[in-house]
């Protein structure tokens, strides 16, 4: 089963470097974000599986012809003090690395979940005291702040969409509806679970190109998915205007020369310094999100047709193959033997 | 005044509006007058708000780091740790800032854009 570990290692390397780089440069994901999202998930899962699997299979090689007999042999060593002399240094090293990597991934996933939940709870506590329920929509609250801000805070039944006064003043009713349906799409499609998994994946292996590229791609794809939901009820022009007004800040409306924009700019600004701090600091640090906004706008300005069904089917088949390949390499030799 | 959550909100509103420390007794009296004024007390007549309830609410708020007690005096006087505006600013800083987990904690309608991109979008707005 020596060749199995090599094949798995090759798969792990291919999924860690060239594949994510090619996919992140491709332009088709903007046309079919859902399909692209599935592909990123398949790449992450298959990548992790083949990475751990390669080390496991290599380490078990001297004590079993396949994964199952190897694991049985390992269990005998761990639990029943069977002699371990068959395992050389590198085998033990690979086995330890596989165990550590697995534990590291699970632990990071749980730790990230805990940290995110703690921040959300604190945020919800303050919102409960500071924000007023919106008259326009369910599960929506309004906070008094001059910058146009809209976001959603996921939390099961306590999920909430938050709008600022500044946003309500700057947007026309149709634009506001577009923003609300965009945020609701995030909550309904449970995008926070994807964000959590890929944030943890990146946190666990920050030096791996695939984790950064995957997180940036997923962040951008969920925005496109939510935009597509908003487009079912509002026009492209409405959504573009909403994005442009919110993105270009409190004075954005004024450049457009609309009456509401002037009203927004005329609102007394209690904390201009802080608002600027918050907006400027991440501009350089999170270049990914800036790219996201611009690619969203260009996608709305010149809409491209969805990928043809055949191409989407091909990508989905690729996803299935990606997951099936490492699984088969790990399990099938055992079943045959 | 049904839930503790609503009471917490009412107490914070009083502390933020009052700008000075107040005892649980004072807060209870003020809560009673505001609820009457708002007509919320309809159907709850005779159901006096107990000082112990106000103290419970205050200790919950203290645990959340929103109010502090003046230790020297008895009965204790409570005041807000920071103003409503400061808390709002803290919240917005969390939303607009670049904390590492921010993108996973909450999903913003628009992420950060650079100055030149904001300028491009502003020009675009003029053409729509």
Image: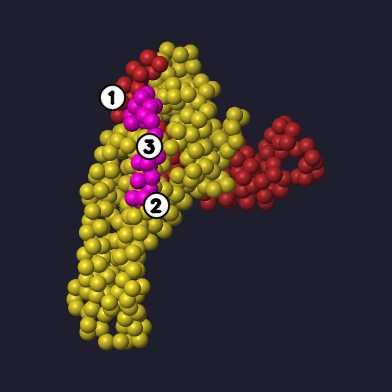
Q: Is residue A305 magenta?
A: yes
What hue does chain A carry in this figure?
yellow
Q: CA distance from mark 2 to mark 3?
A: 29 Å
Residue B69 can be seen, yes or no: no
Label 3, secondary structure: give it. Answer: loop
Residue B37 coordinates in the image, percent (x, y): 72, 31
Q: Neighbour class for label 1 at 10 Å: few (<14), some, many (≥20)? A: few
- Residue A7 place in picture, x, y as percent: 23, 62
The residue that label 3 is drawn on is A308
* Chain B colour as displayed: red
- Give the CA distance from mark 1 to mark 2: 32 Å
Q: Position of residue A84 (x, y in %)?
A: 25, 83
Image quadrant of residue A114? bottom left
Specify start and end residues of the magenta stretch as a single range.
A294-319
The secondary structure that dominates the magenta segment is helix
The residue drawn where x is 45% and y is 33% is A228
Location of residue A256 in the rendering, given as x and y in whole percent from the top left corner: 41, 15
Which residue is label 2 attached to? A197
Whether residue A53 appears in this view of the structure is yes
Residue A299 falls within the magenta-colored stretch: yes
Tell me: residue A72, above or below residue A294.
below
Q: Are marks 1 and 2 on the same chain?
A: no
């Amino acid at each position: 089963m020596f060749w199995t570990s090599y094949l798995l290692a090759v798969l792990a390397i291919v999924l860690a470097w060239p594949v994510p780089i090619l996919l992140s440069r491709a332009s088709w994901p903007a046309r079919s974000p859902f399909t692209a999202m599935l592909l990123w998930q398949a790449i992450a899962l298959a990548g992790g599986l083949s990475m751990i699997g390669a080390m496991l299979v290599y380490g078990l090689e001297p004590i079993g012809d396949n994964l199952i007999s190897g694991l049985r042999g390992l269990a005998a060593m761990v639990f029943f003090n069977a002699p371990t002399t068959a395992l050389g240094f590198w085998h033990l090293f690979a086995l330890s690395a596989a165990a550590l990597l697995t534990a590291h991934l699970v632990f990071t996933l749980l730790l990230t979940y805990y940290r995110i939940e703690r921040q959300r709870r604190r945020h919800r506590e303050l919102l409960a005291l500071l924000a007023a329920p919106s008259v326009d929509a369910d599960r929506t609250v309004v906070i008094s702040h001059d910058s146009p801000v809209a976001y959603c805070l996921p939390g099961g039944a306590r999920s909430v969409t938050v709008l600022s006064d500044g946003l309500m003043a700057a947007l026309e009713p149709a634009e506001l509806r577009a923003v609300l349906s965009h945020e609701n799409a995030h909550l309904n499609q449970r995008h926070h679970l994807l964000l959590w998994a890929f944030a943890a994946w990146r946190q666990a292996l920050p030096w791996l190109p695939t984790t950064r590229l995957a997180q940036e791609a997923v962040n951008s794809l969920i925005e496109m998915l939510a935009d597509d939901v908003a487009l079912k009820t509002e026009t492209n022009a409405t959504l573009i205007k909403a994005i442009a007004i919110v993105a270009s800040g409190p004075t954005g409306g004024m450049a457009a020369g609309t009456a509401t924009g002037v009203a927004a700019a005329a609102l007394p600004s209690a904390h201009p310094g802080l608002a600027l701090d918050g907006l400027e600091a991440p501009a350089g640090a999170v270049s990914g999100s800036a790219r996201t906004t611009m690619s969203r706008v260009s996608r709305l300005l010149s809409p491209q047709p969805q990928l043809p069904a055949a191409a989407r089917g091909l990508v989905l088949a690729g996803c299935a193959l990606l997951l099936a390949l490492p699984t088969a390499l790990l399990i099938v030799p055992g079943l045959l033997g | 005044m049904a839930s503790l959550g609503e009471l917490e909100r009412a107490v914070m509103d009083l502390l933020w509006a009052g700008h000075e420390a107040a005892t649980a007794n004072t807060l209870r009296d003020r809560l009673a007058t505001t609820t009457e004024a708002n007509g919320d007390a309809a159907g709850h007549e005779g159901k006096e708000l107990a000082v112990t309830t106000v103290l419970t609410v205050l200790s919950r708020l203290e645990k959340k780091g929103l109010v502090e007690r003046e230790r020297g005096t008895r009965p204790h006087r409570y005041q807000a740790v920071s103003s409503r505006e400061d808390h709002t600013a803290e919240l917005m800083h969390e939303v607009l800032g670049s904390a590492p987990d921010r993108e996973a904690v909450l999903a913003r309608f628009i992420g950060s854009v650079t100055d030149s991109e904001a300028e491009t979008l502003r020009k675009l707005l003029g053409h729509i």
